Image (cartoon, helix red, strand yellow):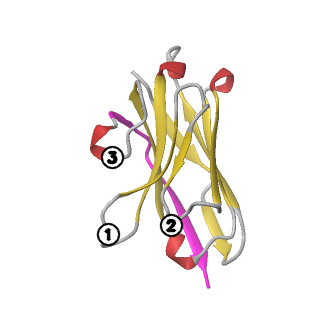
Amino acid sequence: QVQLVESGGGLVQAGGSLSLSCAASGRTFSGYATGWFRQAPGKEREFVAAISRGGGSTYYADSVKGRFTISRDNAKNTVYLQMNSLKPEDTAVYYCAAKYGGVNFSHISYDYWGQGTQVTVSS
């Protein structure tokens, strides 16, 4: 079992940056791939980024590639999402999620979810 809690969301102007953190519980965190997803009002939940269990492989949606960076520190049981050059269309509730084993890009494949943190980017 893994419990996840996101933090770091807030209001930022377009072009600015935010760093999100996802604190995970459990002694077996290193066995879980982690993804970031987001959901804006009226839209379906979409994949943002994912990182492999050991942090050696990262994956990004085309919409955020080059602007967002996912990382993890298994010793601290924490996953991060550094968001730069933010755009108004990045506004959404951001969720971290975990699944045992390898990376997957579909939200339905993830078993554990945080409560979400709001990111609002003003124009």
* x and y, in percent, of residue 6 in the image: 54, 45
**Most frequent secondary structure within the magenta stretch:** strand
Give the amino acid at mark 3: His
Q: Quadrant of residue 72?
A: top right
- Name which residue lies at 30% across and 38% down: 109
Q: Is residue 87 above or below residue 83?
A: below
In the rendered image, residue 101, in percent from the top left (x then y), is placed at: 41, 24
Name the quadrant of the C terminus: bottom right
* Residue positioned 43% across, 46% down in the render: 115
Q: Which residue is mark 3?
A: 107
**In the figure, is residue 101 to the left or right of 10?**
left
- For disc 1, the marked residue is 43
Of tags 3 and 2, the one toward the viewer is 2
Question: Residues in magenta?
Answer: 111-123
Question: Amino acid type of disc 1?
Answer: Lys
- Dot 1 crowding, Cα within 10 Å, few <14, some 14–19, many 20+: few
What kind of element bears circle 1? loop
Of 113 and 46, nearer the camera is 46
Using the numbered discs, state the Cα–Cα distance from disc 3 to disc 1 in whole angstroms: 14 Å
Q: Which mark is residue 63?
A: 2
Q: Secondary structure at mark 3?
A: helix
